[in-house]
Image (tube, rainbow, N blue to C red):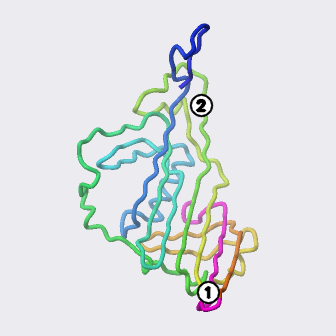
Amino acid sequence: MEPILGLGLLKGANQAQRGFETFKIDVKCFLTASGMTTSGFRSIFLDVEKGIDRVILMNPGFNAQAFLTGLTIDSSVGEFTEVGLTFQGIGNPDISTSTAQIGTDVGGAAAATVLDSSNVTSVDSFGTTVKNAKFSFQMKTETIAQISTQVFTNSTGIPASRVKFIAKPPYQASLSFEGSSLIQITNATNRGAPLPALDFGGGMSVTLQNAVLKSFSTSQTPGEIGAAFSASYEGTSVSEFF
């Protein structure tokens, strides 16, 4: 919104919208044994590369035409595996006015099989006593618009001929680990070598492309069993997504 100013007025005469609206939606949830798979995210991320949005439905709550631009997974010993999703879009998301409470059981959610750290496999390539593993994938995006008389205020989305929301590689992918006996991957320091796959369970497996070891630290205190290690790797993409 841009203030409209006038001579002799201590405040703006009005505020008017001069461009298109954008929005961002962050969703936190648990990784389940069905519904969240690598192949499913692959389909969505490929659409983002082409500038194709998806209808995101949160019931009760809202639905919106949006792009999935970020995915995080966090798994710790003794905890459920958590997933973070970041959606971005153009226009005004259709926020529902439903009177249903957020805590209402919807769509058989109580029957979902939630995964925890015991479902994580293939992690031994990164260390035999990993207690925490975190994965993050972020797509850089750019909004491309053309000069026109289109009014960017509708809630049904913007015509594709007017505004495009497109991914812009290279992307950012990272893996980080904490434990008491981590190892350094021998090929991680060579640019371009893929890291070993990490399977969080339920069909969610990730392999960093063009990855490199960014940081590695260790510390030990008298009275502790073993040394505490941490390692972080970064790459430009994920093999299973593209």
Residue 224 drawn at (x, y percent): 59, 90
Amino acid under label 1? Answer: Ser
Crowding at mark 1 (Cα within 10 Å: few <14, some 14-19, many 20+): some
For the point 43% across and 81% down, the residue is 118
The residue at the point 37 percent across, 37 percent down is: 94
From the viewer's side, name the closer residue of 30 and 147: 30
Please, what is the three-letter code of the amino acid marked with disc 2? Ala
Residue 8 percent coordinates (x, y)? 60, 7
Q: Residue furthest right?
A: 190
**Pick the front one: 111 or 158:** 111
118 in magenta: no
Residue at the image position 25 percent from the left and 57 percent from the top: 107
Q: Residue furthest top?
A: 8
Q: Which x, y percent locates residue 73? A: 50, 66
Span of residues in magenta: 222-242
Q: Is residue 29 above or below residue 148?
A: below
Work out whether 166 lies above or below 223. above
